[in-house]
Amino acid sequence: MAQTKSPRVAEQRPHLARELNAFDATLIVMGGIIGTGIFVNPSVVAARAHTTPLIFAAWIVGGIVALFGGFVFAELAARRPEVGGLYAYMRDAFHPLVAFSYGWTALLVSQSGGMALAAITFALYFNPLALWHVPAIVSAVGVLVLFSVINCFGVKEGGITQNLFMLLKVAVILALIVAGFVVTPAGMPVAAVPSPAIGLGMFALLGSAMIPVLYAYDGWQTASFMSGELKNPRRTLSYGLVIGVLAVIVLYVAVTIVCIRVLGPDKLALSSAPATEIMHLAGPAWEWIIAMGVGLSTLGFLSNQILTSPRIYYAMAEDGDFFASLAWLHPKTEAPIVAIALQGVVAIAITLAGAAFAALRQGYQSILDGVVAIDFTFFALAALAVFVFRNRDRSDEGVTIEVPGHPYTTAIFGVVCAGVVAYSMVAYPRDTLPCIAALVSAVPAYWLWRCFKKR
């Protein structure tokens, strides 16, 4: 009797709806990258790099690394177009334990931490000029709850919301760029700080500055989580990754030029909201517009993260490596609402912890360093996965895009990612070591889960 019923039950079970096209994929890639970073990190980069040449070098090198990463994930998406993205790549290339470790740290650190950073940035920009007479932490938590609810209505609704906010983000960045070339630079020019001589000191400054830069470029991988909801994911996701990353590089370099032109490296390093200061020079109306625009565009990043991240936990549950309820889809919306709710709760907890740990700005930098350390650990493994799949796959049939310059470019990307992790642990141990501890804790958590399943 059970044998006759099980196929029928499987047929009636909801599946992730393939509602998203190539345009959606490109905007999801850009939406996963453009968020908190470009509106706050220019000041962090300036504070760490000090001089104009090193500031520009950090953003350009970071763009090249991001492009290499885009190609790596484009090939992975073409070879393994499965729901869960990087989680699935880790599982198929290495071992379910590695995949579990990625999902575990995505929930506890990287994805939830990125959402917390976006919520904090929203509060920093939005509250002062939007006549919101509430503590900033209330605004940060409120938007996390709001977008968790919106994405429970389904992938189509979540995708439309993400796309609208993505277009708004581009409009705000373009307005900032135009204003930066029109307004008069702030104050008297300061004396140029001589660039450090080529040596360990210069590379130490560049390495320190690369962490916030790479966080600003981080996020191209989130689109791969949506493979199960993309039409023809092999093609749409592969090309969306490359086009999206290239567009973001152009926007980021233009913003860097504007920040240096208007504020200069010294004033930029002291600014907590450089976009607001630039638009302030254009007049009160522009200042209000940029505050509202940056706040709302930051919400777009939140929308992107809440749209994409729960698909990791859905894939884990589908594999039997996490709570089965996380794989439950609402029969009408076909959305993994339990996974969405879990993601929202953890992101709120990290936001509250960051605010309690220090002032919002210091909490932002602390979360940033930890998130980068975890993300780039798995980016290095993603580069290694390309080598594994190329060696394992008998043919490249169906692979619509490959990493150009492989194996050299793939190896460079992997080595740079590993170097970023090592530098973060040495330079910012207070921020990164707790996150690395969360990664290590995935090993006993995985085996305990397996023992629990057996019983």
Image (cartoon, rainbow, N blue to C red):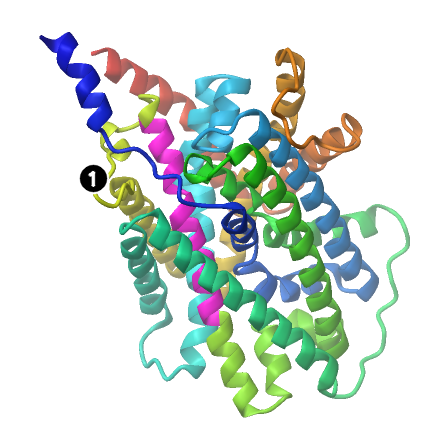
Q: Which residue is mark 1?
A: 331
Task: Answer few, some or many: residues within 10 Å of disc 1's Cα (few below 14, many 20 plus, some between 14 and 19).
Answer: few
Our reading of the magenta stretch's main secondary structure is helix
Tell me the residue at 52%/51% (across/down). 32
Looking at the rendered image, the quarter that the C terminus falls into is: top left
**356 or 35, nearer to the observer:** 35
Judge from the rendering whether residue 315 lies leftward or rightward of residue 201; answer left or right: left
**427 or 339, nearer to the observer:** 339
Q: Position of residue 249 (x, y in %)?
A: 69, 55
Q: Residue furthest left?
A: 1
- Note whether 259 is above or below 199 in the view shown: below
Corner quadrant of residue 234 = top right
Judge from the rendering whether residue 3 lies leftward or rightward of residue 218; answer left or right: left
Q: What residue type is disc 1 on?
A: Pro
Corner quadrant of residue 146 = bottom left
| Magenta span includes 301 | yes
Tell me the residue at 49%/33% (across/down). 85
Q: Residue furthest right?
A: 197
**209 or 337, nearer to the observer:** 337
Q: Secondary structure at mark 1?
A: loop
Looking at the rendered image, the quarter that the N terminus falls into is: top left
**397 or 272, nearer to the observer:** 397
Q: Is residue 357 visible?
A: no
Q: Position of residue 225 (x, y in %)?
A: 46, 38
Q: Is residue 349 visible?
A: yes
**Magenta-colored span:** 295-317
Judge from the rendering whether residue 405 lies leftward or rightward of residue 287; answer left or right: right
Q: Position of residue 321 (x, y in %)?
A: 33, 23
Tell me the residue at 56%/57% (across/down). 34
| Magenta span includes 337 | no
